[in-house]
Every structure is written in structure tokens, then in C-alpha cells.
Image (cartoon, rainbow, N blue to C red):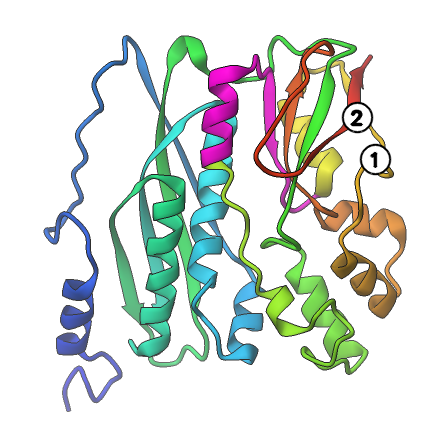
Amino acid sequence: MNYKDSGVDIEAANAFAKSIPIANHGFGGMFPVPSGYDEPVLVSGADGVGTKINIARIAGDYTTIGIDLVAMCVNDVITSGAKPLYFLDYISTQKIDDKVADIMVGILKGCEIAGCELLGGETAEHFRQRDYDLAGFCTGIVERDCIVDGKNIKPGDKVIGLASSGVHSNGYTLINDMLWRHKIGYDDGYIGKGMPELLTPTTIYAPVIKELLEEYPILGMAHITGGGIHENLSRCIPEGLKVRVDYNSWPLPEVFSKIQLAGEIPEEEMKKVFNLGIGFCLVVPPEIDIHTTIPSWEIGEVYE
């Protein structure tokens, strides 16, 4: 009996690792601290893609789920005003195969979009594991006096919502359960355009946020994930203040209407679970008019 008989193919794992275009194939990834900062602060975040991986499994398409993984981590880090520097991944699988390679293609694409480097990672084989699991880790950098922390937000400031590409990577446990309970096929047209729409990758907001930070006085930012718009916005609002959101101020993407109808999901539950078409929020002074390269709307205001 040997390790391969038990489910771990060391030679295949080594070959896969060497095929990944990263700068360092040693034990630890190294990244030089960028110059030009007086008092640099590192900002880190870790996340996963949750049960969206099940949609990829049913569809047999793992080419975009890696983009989701990068997006979930990068979008958290940039809410502080940080520039993404590098990313690390963890992939857990029964065996290293073409699907793992497809996941890695997405991760590399996500890093390219975010403008960060894939510094390293780990691919683990678990012989009893039926599916894949993913986790990611991102580190960014920001000048201390440029940190966006929401402390200067005050009543009357307005909230700008940036469009999402769809469901992104949250709410899939409800979607999977809904489809199973109601015996709805993933690709029968009940959910938007079926499987392809459910696999649309999460928008990576790093490029547009970089441009906006250079041009506008942004007071606070929120990545809209699980918990919906209100819960995530509250994380960047000072204690004692609240946010009023007008859910009629932007067009609701059809995929959410389909989900709500098919699952008979109450409106308030939809607001607590899904982004409803808004993937990232900015808080700015009331006199500022934001112009972005992606669709955006004034969706609310801060009040006491």
C-alpha cells in the first residue's frame, strides 16, 4: 500500500503546483513592500464562495468560480481604501484533476482583474471528500491617513450603489434548497437564464474603486454580501447613525424576481439575503456627484 492508493498522488500534485504561474515555488511567498508610502498599513481579508460551488458542480463548469473567490476577498479589502497586493488560495478536493485546473484559471483571471499577484496557495487532497471547497486570502496596502473608515460620515451624506453582476456569491444555500424543495431544474429557465446566469462571476470592484478614490472624497464603503444592503452598510456607518435605502431607486435584475417567485420568498427575506442588484456601496457628501464606469445610482441617505 502507498500514498497514491490512499488517494494522494504526490507526483500529480507536484506537477500541478509547478504549472501555476507564481513568482515563488518555495515554502513561503515573498512580496516586497511597495515604496512611496510614508506610513503604510496592510489590510487583509479571507473568504470563500460558499455553496455556489454546488452550482458549478451541477453545471460541470468550474472556469469562473475562481473569479468569485478572488472577488469576495478583494472586495472586502478595498472597502478600507486599500490597493490589493497579493492573493493566496486554498483548494480542497478528492483528487487533482482538470476541474481544479479550471478553478485555478479563474483565480488567475480574478487576480489579473484586481491588479494583484497570486503569491501562493495550497491544494489538498481528501480521499473521502465528494466535492471541492475553496478559500482565499488577500492583502492590500493603504497610506494611514488615506484609510476609509467611515468616521467622518454624518447625517445628510448620500449612499451610491454600484451595480452587481447578479447574485454574486451569497444566498446560494437558499437557492440550492429552494430548487431542491420545489423540484426546479437548474437550467429550465425558472431562474433567469438558468445555470449560466447563476454562475455569472462576482464583480471585482478594485479597478473602479481605485479611480473613484483618486477623484472623489469617499467617506465610507461597503461590500454587499450576506445580510444584504442594510446590514453591510451598517458596518461602515458610525454608531448612532442609520441609513435609509430606497429600494425603488435602481432596476431590480430579473434573476432576483425569478428567485423570489420560484421560492415564494417574502420581500424582507430577499432584502436580508441578496444584494438585489447592488454589489458595492459608497458614502459621499451630499454635494458630490459620482460618475463611474459601471452603472450606479443614488440609493439612500444617512440620518440620525
Give me the disc on residue 85: none
Asked if the residue at tag 1 contacts the one at tag 2, i.e. Cβ–Cβ closer than 8 Å, the answer is yes
Q: Amino acid at mark 1?
A: Ser
Residue 106 rendering spot, x and y as whole percentages: 39, 60
- SS under mark 2: strand
Residue 291 rendering spot, x and y as whole percentages: 62, 25
> Relative to residue 130, is residue 256 drawn left or right?
right
- Residue at the left extreme of this rendering: 26
Q: Amino acid at mark 2?
A: Gly
Name the residue tied to disc 1: 249
> Relative to residue 30, is residue 229 drawn left or right?
right
Total count of labels: 2
| Residue at position x 70%, y 43% in the image | 227
| Cα gap from disc 2 to disc 1, whole angstroms | 8 Å
- SS under mark 1: loop
Q: Is residue 77 magenta?
A: no
The front one of 249 and 223 is 249
| Residue at position x 22%, y 23% in the image | 34
Q: Is residue 210 magenta?
A: yes
> Relative to residue 280, is residue 26 drawn left or right?
left
Give me the disc on residue 300: 2
Question: Which segment did they paint magenta?
Answer: 207-227
Task: Specify the quadrant that holds the C terminus.
Answer: top right
